[in-house]
Image (tube, rainbow, N blue to C red):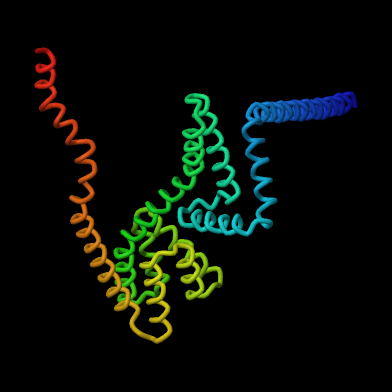
């Protein structure tokens, strides 16, 4: 009987000790979580001035968007530019807020350094143009990569169609064997739309509307017409790839022919003055010495 009493007491003590350890661990975890939240809030307060100004500007611009028609059209243009550059994580009012902050910051900086309002207002315009120029540069580079890769992708898809695969299966094979590129991301979105239940025509039209590229629109139109009239998809894509490749060759030849004309201004304003300075500089110094 004594043995069972001792065993019961040991079990009670063990359960009590386990409960106490569990309660202590819970309190420690809550304390650590509270300390993390306080640290995060303190860091947020340190970075608050710039963020608060940006949030105020964004809220103001969002409020006046519907009241000014020109501003609304400008928002739509920025939204199309964000789609072209694949930066849809930003919002148009955020880009406009960055423009205002960059313009005001450059204006104040130049005014403090130079003290002239004319140059400061020039800095205001240049600072406001920096976010838009950044987006345009991203969009142009991305579109060039898409156009450069499009003929190769069409050749792969045409070969897959000749082998008996569908267009979606051909695009899937291209994505498996190609390196990551902007055209691959567009094709991935196209496949996701078709797999989610959307028709091929609607997915192609949405992709062409998002990119706004003539060659890609030609690809989508050719594919839609080939599906509508029952013509050979593989032959259509192969002929289109040859046409686009010839177009790229002609554009490269045109750029090479325009290169001497574009080199005139750097030659006149940068290269020739330095050449004349190196050649006639010693003679001029000797003349001054005499």
Residue 62 seen from this side: yes
Judging depth in this view, the residue of 195 and 267 nearest the camera is 267
Q: Position of residue 26 (x, y in %)?
A: 76, 30
Residue 176 found in image quarter = bottom left
Horizontal side, residue 238 vs residue 107: left or right? left
**Residue at the location (89% across, 23% down)?**
2
Q: Is residue 56 above or below residue 202?
A: above
Q: Position of residue 38 (x, y in %)?
A: 72, 27
Q: Position of residue 192 (x, y in %)?
A: 51, 64
Judging depth in this view, the residue of 280 and 71 nearest the camera is 280
**Residue at the location (26% across, 71% down)?**
243
Horizontal side, residue 22 vs residue 123: left or right? right
**Residue at the location (40% across, 56% down)?**
182
Horizontal side, residue 234 vs residue 270: left or right? right
Residue 191 seen from this side: no
Image quadrant where one finds the N terminus:
top right
Residue 155 found in image quarter = bottom left
Image quadrant where one finds the C terminus:
top left
Q: Position of residue 185 (x, y in %)?
A: 44, 58
Q: Is residue 279 above or below residue 201?
A: above
**Residue at the location (57% across, 51% down)?**
92
Judging depth in this view, the residue of 5 and 201 nearest the camera is 201
Q: Is residue 239 above or below residue 106?
A: below
Residue 10 found in image quarter = top right
């Amino acid at each position: 009987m004594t043995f069972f009493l001792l065993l019961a007491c040991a079990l009670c003590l063990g359960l009590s000790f386990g409960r106490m350890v569990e309660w202590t661990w819970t309190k420690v975890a809550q304390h650590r979580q509270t300390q993390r939240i306080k640290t995060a809030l303190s860091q947020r307060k340190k970075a608050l001035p710039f963020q608060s100004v940006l949030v105020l500007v964004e809220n103001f611009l969002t409020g006046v968007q519907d009241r000014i028609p020109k501003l609304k059209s400008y928002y739509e243009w920025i939204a199309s530019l964000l789609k072209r550059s694949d930066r849809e994580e930003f919002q148009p009012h955020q880009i406009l807020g960055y423009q205002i902050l960059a313009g005001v910051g450059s204006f104040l900086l130049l005014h403090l350094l130079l003290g002239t309002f004319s140059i400061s207002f020039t800095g205001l315009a240049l600072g406001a143009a920096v976010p838009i120029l950044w987006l345009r540069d991203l969009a142009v580079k991305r579109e060039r990569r898409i156009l450069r890769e499009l003929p190769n992708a069409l050749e792969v898809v045409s070969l897959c169609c000749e082998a008996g695969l569908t267009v979606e299966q051909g695009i899937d094979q291209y994505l498996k064997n190609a390196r990551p590129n902007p055209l691959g991301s567009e094709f991935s979105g196209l496949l996701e739309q078709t797999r989610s239940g959307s028709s091929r025509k609607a997915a192609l039209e949405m992709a062409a509307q998002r990119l706004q590229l003539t060659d890609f629109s030609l690809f989508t139109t050719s594919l839609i017409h080939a599906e509508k009239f029952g013509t050979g998809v593989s032959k259509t894509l192969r002929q289109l790839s040859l046409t686009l490749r010839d177009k790229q060759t002609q554009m490269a030849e045109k750029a090479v022919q325009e290169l001497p004309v574009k080199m005139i201004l750097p030659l006149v304003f940068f290269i020739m003055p330095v050449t004349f300075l190196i050649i006639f500089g010693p003679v001029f110094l000797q003349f001054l010495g005499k």
